[in-house]
């Protein structure tokens, strides 16, 4: 946004690229988390008692945090996509006014 003129310039390709990048990063994070969880399950399988209980409690908190992070990434991706659509619709409407 140009602060002196109030003009906003939108680059639709950049918005789409950002959206795709968020999707890719979210997928990569999930893959790494799945790998980490598989390794942790192997280790935790040998634990009993308080150690296992502490691990399970920490894992529940971790899982909730990761689910929240993924929701934020997904919401951001959706909002970027919606913004691009709204900007494009506004551009078309403004162009029609010029005709």
Image: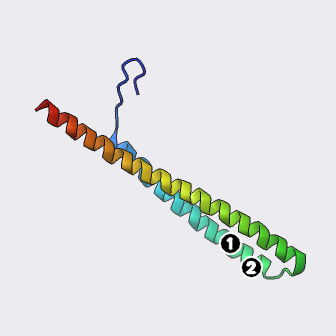
Q: Of 55 and 27, which appears nearest the observer?
A: 55
Number of the label disc, if any, that sits on residue 98: none
Q: Residue at x 68, y 69 (%)?
A: 36
Asked whether, in this view, residue 56 is left or right of residue 98, the answer is right
The x and y percentages for residue 81 are 38, 50
- Is residue 61 found left or right of 4 in the rendered image? right
Q: In the rendered image, is residue 16 in sight?
A: no
Q: Name the element at disc 1.
A: helix
Q: Earlier in the sequence, mark 1 or mark 2?
A: 1
Which numbered circle lies on residue 42? 2
Instruction: Look at the numbered discs 1 and 2 and tell me whether their residues touch, using CB distance below 8 Å.
Output: no
Q: Which residue is mark 1?
A: 37
The residue drawn where x is 21% and y is 39% is 93
Q: Residue at 79% of width from left, 77% of height from top?
A: 44
Rate crowding at label 1 as few (under 14), some (14 to 19) or many (20 or more) other CA atoms within 10 Å.
Answer: some
Picture quadrant where residue 51 is located? bottom right
Residue for point 56% across, 59% down? 70
């Amino acid at each position: 946004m140009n602060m002196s003129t109030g003009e906003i310039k939108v680059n639709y390709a950049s918005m789409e690229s950002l959206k795709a990048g968020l999707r890719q990063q979210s997928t990569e994070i999930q893959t790494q988390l799945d790998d980490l969880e598989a390794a942790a399950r192997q280790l935790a399988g040998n634990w009993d008692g308080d150690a296992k209980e502490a691990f399970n409690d920490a894992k529940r908190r971790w899982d909730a945090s990761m689910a929240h992070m993924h929701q934020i990434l997904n919401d951001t991706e959706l909002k970027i996509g919606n913004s691009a659509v709204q900007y494009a619709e506004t551009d078309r409407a403004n162009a029609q006014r010029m005709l």
